[in-house]
Amino acid sequence: MPVVGSVHARALSVPLHTPFVTALRRTSTIDTLLVEVRTDDGITGLGEAPQVWAVTGESVAGAAACVQQVLAPLIVGRQLDDWADIAASLAGACARNFGAKAAVETGLLDALARSSGLPFAHLLADIAGLPRPLLEVPTDVTVSAGEPYELASAAVARVAEGFGRLKLKVGTDAATDVARVAAVRAAVGPDIGIRLDANQGWTPEQAVDVIVALTAAGLGIELVEQPVPADDVEGLAWVRQRADVPIMADETVYGERELERVIRLGAADAVNVKLAKCGGPLTALRMLRRAREAGLGTMVGSMMESHVGVAAAASVVAAVGTSSVSDLDAAWWTAASPYVGGPSYERGMVKLPTTPGLGISAPR
């Protein structure tokens, strides 16, 4: 079995074709750390750790230091078939640094999948004890925060491109958020799915007021994601008790411990699992299984990351499924892919390569 010979990390900055705007931030680039796990027989597995200051607090520089100083020494010289023990070592190597851990674990599993001749999603399905899936999954597409006419115009464009489900970024101004949603619904008609993401932008009281108004207006909202600040789990539960629209936890839930707290407090109807929040694909698989057992809806999301991170997240969805269409549009925002190969977008679907691993070659 191949042995991990080295781990390399380098920063990438990938321009977006359109600024990405939420209640937390505005960005025109994907700034991320690309990790390459190289074996002694010439295989290279890829992973990435996106920089998202306002959510995870991780930076490219910090992730690079974690990878090089803490995580890489744990896997160099280890055989790929020891992946389960290696992953456990990575998870316990240091506090937090989930993006860095996810990048190294993804790179390790990508190398394993390539060595085994399997697409990444098929490897994950084998690990989960499930049938090997088709290599495509549906995704929503984000409509950035802005004025009502801006959201409506962007929504019409996204629908014309084949997306059937829109994720509207709200939370910038509770007093006018209902008008934003109403403008989009009027522009796209009744048959397009609309979900909202407040990105922690409301107080619990504002969240309930907005949700009640949305319901009264008959705007047909599928769910509301992270309406209140991440650490206000009790406030999230308070909103859920008073809302007649499903409430999804995102920033509130990083890993398994936070998921258990949400379950215990009945704080959400559903959870958004992200690899860069939880530490990698293997933890994501466990979280999705636990959420289903507890009766929670599930989704897999992407941070503002490139095709490597999206391919890994989409592979998780393909392997084990989710109850709701996932949020995997991050790489769609890039002006051009810096990679050779990788996932593509077609009429609201993420199509994964049929080649081994993630099917992506790193830029030179």
Image (spheres, rainbow, N blue to C red):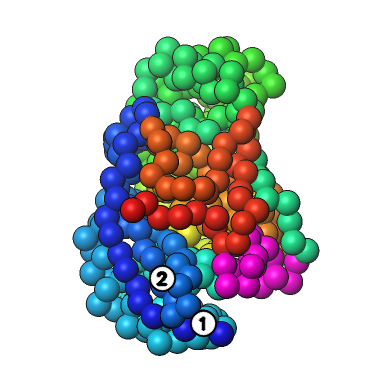
**Quarter assignment of residue 21:** top left
Query: Residue 98: horizontal and vertical position, in percent?
Result: 38, 65
Query: Residue 4: horizontal and vertical position, in percent?
Result: 43, 80
Identify the element where label 2 is drawn: strand
Name the residue at 28% across, 59% down: 10
Asked if disc 1 and disc 2 are in contact, CB closer than 8 Å, the reply is no
Which is more foreground, mark 1 or mark 2?
A: 1
Viewer-proximal residue among 232 and 339: 339
- Looking at the image, is 127 positioned above or below residue 34? below
Name the residue at 33% across, 30% down: 19
- Bin the neighbour count of mark 1 within 10 Å (Cα to Cα): few under 14, some 14-19, many 20 and up: some
- Looking at the image, is 142 positioned above or below residue 229? above
In the image: residue 27, left or right of residue 326: left
- Bin the neighbour count of mark 2 within 10 Å (Cα to Cα): few under 14, some 14-19, many 20 and up: many
- How far is disc 1 from disc 2 in space, using C-alphas? 12 Å
Judging by the rendered image, the residue that carries numbered circle 1 is: 2
Judging by the rendered image, the residue that carries numbered circle 2 is: 37
Name the residue at 42% across, 12% down: 149
Quarter of the picture holding the N terminus: bottom right
Viewer-proximal residue among 109 and 101: 109
- Start-end of magenta stretch: 113-130
**Quarter assignment of residue 347:** top right
